[in-house]
Amino acid sequence: MKNARRIIASRLSCRAFNGEPIVAKHRGLLTTSIVKPLAGPLGTTVRVVEVENSPTLNADLEERCSYGSVHGAPSLLVPVVPRERHAMEDVGAIVERLLLELEGSGIGSCWFVGNFAGGAIEREVAPESNSVLPAVIPIGYRATRRTASDSAIRFSVGSRKRKRWSELYFEIEFWDDDQRPNTPPTPLSPAEAPDIEEMLEAVRLAPSTSNNQPWRIYRYTTDSGPDRLHLCLKRNPGMDKVIRDVDVQKIDAGVAMAHFQAVAEEIGMSGAWVYDKPAYLPHGVEYVASWSE
C-alpha cells in the first residue's frame, strides 16, 4: 500500500466532520471497495455498505455505542458478515485496510463497534439472514475544529498512548527437532527485528477498542529454517464478548493484521496471513493467525 507508514503514523480517529459529501474524485475508491463482497485474509466474505447519514441513523449509532458523539458525518460504512468462525478478524482486516486508503485521500473515519440488530441502521442496510453488523464507521472530511466531546473521548481512552514493544512482541527459541520451546518468551526489541521492525511498529500504532491493544506477536525461531510469526490475543478481562454476537477483540486483531500487511506491501515484502496454528502456544493467549512469506 502506498504511503502506508506515513498514513498510519499520522492517522487519528475522527468523530467531528464538516458535513460536506464525499466528492467525485474520492468516490472511485469507495465504489471499488464496496461494489462487491471482499474475501478476508482468513476466508470470510465481507460486504461493506455505504449509507447516507441522517439524524435517525446518527441517533441509532450513538444510542448503541458509548464511544462519543458523531457530528457532521455525511456517510456511514456498515460491514455485513455471516456468522462464521473468522468473521470478526476478517471484518477488522478488510475494513481497516479501506479506512487507511480513505485516510490517504483525506477522508477521516472512526470505528464504532457494537451490535446494530433491530435498529434504524439495520433496517437501512437490510442484511441477509444469519448475518451480523458488527460495526458502523462514520466517514467524511474532518471538521476544522475538534469538538469538546471528541477531545474528551480522545483523552479518556489515551488514544495517543501505546504499549511498549516489550509488552507486545516476543521471541521463543525452539530446538529443530522439538515442538516444545527451548526458552520462555523473551521481549523482542526493534534492534533484534530489523527485517520486520516497520511492520511491528505499524501494528503498535493500530487503533483498538478502548486502546487496549490485545494483540501479541511471537517470533518462533530455530537454528535452521525460517522464523515464523504468530499473532495471538491476550484478552482483557471484562472485554471478552461484552457485545452479543460481536467479538471486539478479534476485530482488533484483524485491524492489526491490516496494518502489518499494508506496510509489508509498501516495503516490498510479499506474504499473507494464514490460519496455521502451531503445536505450542504460550500460556494465556489465544491463537489468531500466522504470517506466511
Image (cartoon, rainbow, N blue to C red):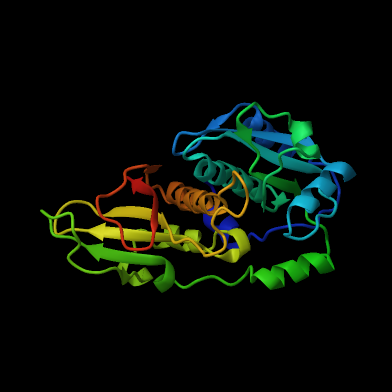
208 and 36: which one is in front?
A: 208
Query: Residue 68's spot in the image, x, y percent?
Result: 76, 60
Task: State whether residue 226 is above or below residue 173.
Answer: above
Left or right? Give the position of 56 relative to 89. Answer: right
Quarter placement of the C terminus: top left
Left or right? Give the position of 135 relative to 163. Answer: right
Query: Residue 9's spot in the image, x, y percent?
Result: 57, 62
Left or right? Give the position of 118 relative to 269. Answer: right
Going 84% across and 48% down the picture, which residue do you hit?
59
Query: Residue 245's spot in the image, x, y percent?
Result: 59, 43
Outermost residue, right side = 55
66 and 196: which one is in front?
A: 66
Task: State whether residue 287 is above or below residue 119.
Answer: below
**Residue 22 visible within the image:** yes
The count of marks equals 0
Query: Residue 43's spot in the image, x, y percent?
Result: 45, 34
Going 58% across and 59% down the picture, which residue do you hit?
208
Going 34% across and 69% down the picture, which residue do you hit?
188
**Residue 54 visible within the image:** no
65 and 243: which one is in front?
A: 243
